[in-house]
Image: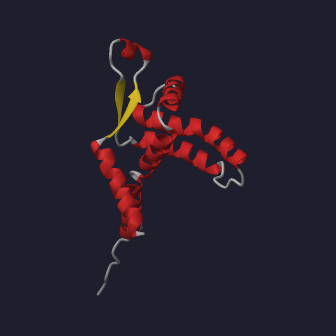
Amino acid sequence: MESISIELEAADTLLDKGVPLPVTAPLLFRIFGKKTITLILKHPFLDTAVRAGSLYLQVQEMGLETENVTEGIRLREKSAGLIARIIAIIILRNRFPDWLERLLAFYLKRHVAEKTLYNITNVVVCSGISDFLNTIRLTSHLRMTRPNLSPTEKRS
């Protein structure tokens, strides 16, 4: 349990400072001499985190149990687009049209290593969960929704 909390704190610290993601620059930038661009991943807003979390759950529902190489390749083929889309949503941080998210996801799939995408997805999905869980625990401990009873009247 303690190692999990340390990992969550490390993910939060990384996203507080911003995680740089160097990517090969698009052709227009390369023509003018810029070889790479650096995209910065920061803490996502709640809406963004919920959307990224729902895509992450879709990846988890595909099943991680593979019995042979063929099933593993099929799983990677299905999940690669979703993983790239999670990173694209986190980079954009706001609600943009679907076509823009999909375009950035397509670009990331072609220009970022697969292992890097999976590692960043784990960091992003794990961040912020500890704050949410601590808030829920505090609320349940304080019993803020407990009914407030009026005092009984004493008569002599």
Residue 70 occupies which quadrant of the picture? top right
Task: Name the side, left or right, on which 67 lies relative to 59.
Answer: right
Furthest-bottom residue in view?
A: 156
Position of the N terminus by quadrant: bottom left
Q: Indicate the position of residue 8 as horizontal and vertical percent values.
A: 38, 57
Q: Indicate the position of residue 80 as horizontal and vertical percent values.
A: 58, 38
Which residue is rendered at x = 42% and y = 49% of the image? 123
- Res. 144 in view: no
Which residue is rendered at x = 55% and y = 42% of the image? 55
Which residue is rendered at x = 33% and y = 57% of the image? 9
Q: Vertical placement of 149 versus 13: above or below? A: below
Q: Vertical placement of 149 versus 101: above or below? A: below
Q: Nearer the viewer, residue 44 or 23?
A: 23
Q: Indicate the position of residue 36 as horizontal and vertical percent values.
A: 36, 25
Task: Name the side, left or right, on which 102 lies relative to 95.
Answer: right
Q: Vertical placement of 27 versus 145: above or below? A: above
Residue 7 occupies which quadrant of the picture? bottom left
- Res. 38 in view: yes
Q: Indicate the position of residue 71 as horizontal and vertical percent values.
A: 71, 47
